Image: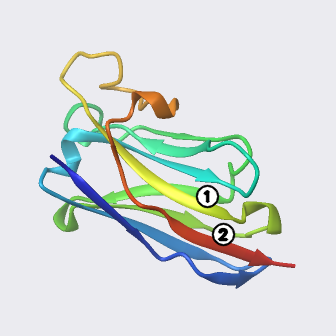
Amino acid sequence: QVQLVESGGELVQAGGSLRLSCAASGGILSSYAVGWFRQAPGKEREFVAAVAAISWSGGNTVISDSVKGRFTISRDNAKNTVYLQMNSLKPEDTAVYYCAAKYTYYGDAHSLSPPVTQGLYDYWGQGTQVTVSS
């Protein structure tokens, strides 16, 4: 089983940047689609960004419209880690950020485009808190 550990969350001022990391153990992350989700207080968890398994797609990405142009997702296969680079942060980005992984097989529905629905992911990290002050 894959274990995921997020890190990098902290308190930052509006307009600042953070890079979140999702480090995996127990599996080769390049064979997994990896998504980032976030949950703000009193709100449902929502999709942020995802990257397809690089083994099949070269790492196609999907970014939520709410963060497009500010957030990017990337992989470092040597470190078995996926990153979420967050720039131009806003107070409304304050949330607990979770990474999730789904093993994908060649030719399955998500081998080229990663899922954006949280229910399709099999493994989850514990989350990391991001707080953006105004």
* Image coords of residue 10 (percent x, y): 59, 81
Residue farthest to the front?
A: 42
Marks counted in the figure total: 2
Q: Nearer the viewer, residue 15 or 44?
A: 44
Is 30 located above or below residue 52 in the figure?
Answer: below
Please state which amino acid type lies under the numbered disc 2.
Asn
Residue drawn at x 79%, y 67% is 90
Q: SS for tag 1?
A: strand
Please, what is the three-letter code of the amino acid marked with disc 1? Answer: Phe
Say which residue appears at 52% left-offset and 32% top-offset: 116
- Residue 117's mark? none
Quadrant of the drawing holding the C terminus: bottom right
- Which residue: 17% across, 65% down? 78
Q: Which residue is mark 2?
A: 87
Coordinates of residue 67 in the picture (x, y in percent): 69, 51
Q: What element does badge 2 sit on? A: loop
In this image, 69 relative to 80: left or right? right
In space, the residues marked 1 and 2 are separated at their CA atoms by 6 Å
Looking at the picture, tell me which residue is in the foreground, 60 or 119.
119
Report the side of 94 relative to 27 (left or right): right
Q: Quadrant of residue 91?
A: bottom right
C-beta proximity under 8 Å, tags 1 and 2: yes
Q: How is the image coloured?
A: rainbow
Q: Is residue 46 above or below residue 70?
A: above
Tell which circle, 1 or 2, labels the residue nearer the N-terminal end.
1
Q: Position of residue 26 (x, y in %)?
A: 12, 55
Tag 1: Cα neighbours inside 10 Å, few (<14), some, or many (≥20)? many
Q: What residue lies at 19% left-to-right and 38% top-to-bottom? A: 55
Dot 1 corresponds to which residue? 71
Instruction: Determine whether 86 is above or below 63 in the image.
Output: below
